Image (tube, rainbow, N blue to C red):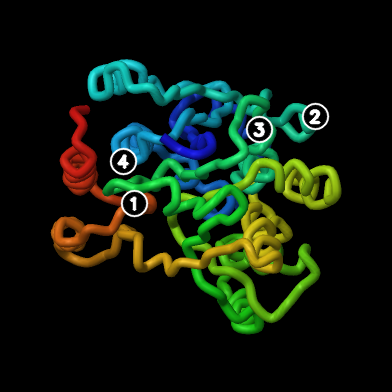
Amino acid sequence: MTAFPIDALVPWVDGDDPVLAAKRRQYLDPDAARNDDVGGATRFKSIGEIRFCVASILRFAPFVRNVFIMTDGQDPGLDGFLEKNFPGHPTRVRIVDHREIFRGYEKALPVFNSNAIEAVMWNIPEMAEHILYFNDDFMLTGPVRPEDFFPDEERVVCFGSWFWAPFGRFLRCVKPRHGGHRTIGFKDMMINALDEMGGGSRFINLGHTPRPLLKSWFEEWARTRPDMVWKNLTGKFREPFHYQAQEPFYLDMARRGKLVLVPEESKTLYFKRRNKKDYVREKLAAFDRSDKCFACFNSLDYCTPQEQELVLSWLSRRIGVTV
């Protein structure tokens, strides 16, 4: 039970879907296709992580009322999996198409850019005021409580840390180029958000975690700063001028004294494939020794099939589901 409803949002894409792949190719230039930060295949790859993301919410955050999966004419086909593992569970899982999310912004469609989707994801009529935003490679790995994200109705928790903006700008200047495109990093988009919000000497370096949000803030933001919304809707793929869409929210909440900042590393297990022998086994063994309640499994498509099977088996055990 919660004092107020809490819903979860998860964007998802199956990049191997031939219909969506053909649509994407209509807008994708060769340089962007070779850049993983822009239009490379890994940005759209799925090996079934969405099953574990949703299952972890149902298992460890049963207070979540709805899980909205945002897609472009696709369906991850979770019904059988969820019915087998969570029969009668009260949380509703619903597919929300981009055409619904982009109501009023239809001329931006189609988009293949997470920044655009995140700029309008508040646009679901039945969604609760209090939202937990997950990427599909984020999972819960232990029980959580509503107050871990929302200490009360007005305050939110942000899992991250302050970062000195001048150093972030220096890092952006020395980034390498891939083809005709400079690498577009996560910090670059947070710096862009800081600039859009009036600038400053520091920004919040957001962690790879679930992100608590307030729908009403984004509705007001869209009314008062439509220029910012449309900025992220310009371009079918990531552009160097795009900004990280949740960063303005957290910066504003900090200025209002309504932000609780918690270090990411205190809560999160982070997996990113390294060219190191036995990396996967050693990483999963370390995870087994941890009681942290979040995990991010980044770019599992870089793993070998055997390594992917190790990761998915570990997730099955940790979350307690049968695939």
Of helix, strand and loop, which one carries label 4? helix
Q: Position of residue 225 (x, y in %)?
A: 83, 51
Which sits earlier in the primary sequence, circle 1 or circle 2? 2
Q: Which of these two is toward me, 184 or 257?
A: 257
**Residue 270, quarter of the rendered image:** bottom left
In the depicted structure, whether residue 208 falls above or below residue 19: below
Q: State the residue position of label 2.
A: 104
Which sits earlier in the primary sequence, circle 2 or circle 4? 4
Labelled disc at residue 60: 4
Q: Which of these two is toward me, 78 or 4?
A: 4
Mark 3 → mark 4, Cα distance in angstroms: 41 Å
Mark 1 → mark 4, Cα distance in angstroms: 18 Å
Mark 2 → mark 4, Cα distance in angstroms: 35 Å
Of helix, strand and loop, which one carries label 2? loop
**What amino acid type is highlighted by mark number 1?**
Phe
Mark whose residue sits in front, 1 or 4: 4
Which sits earlier in the primary sequence, circle 1 or circle 4? 4
Q: Position of residue 320 (x, y in %)?
A: 19, 36
Q: Position of residue 100 (x, y in %)?
A: 67, 24
Mark whose residue sits in front, 3 or 4: 4
Q: State the residue position of label 1.
A: 297
Of helix, strand and loop, which one carries label 1? strand
**What amino acid type is highlighted by mark number 2?**
Gly
**What amino acid type is highlighted by mark number 3?**
Gln
Mark 1 → mark 2, Cα distance in angstroms: 34 Å
In the depicted structure, whether residue 102 falls above or below residue 115: above
**What amino acid type is highlighted by mark number 4?**
Phe
Mark whose residue sits in front, 2 or 4: 4
Q: State the residue position of label 3.
A: 26
Q: Position of residue 211 (x, y in %)?
A: 51, 51
Which sits earlier in the primary sequence, circle 3 or circle 1? 3
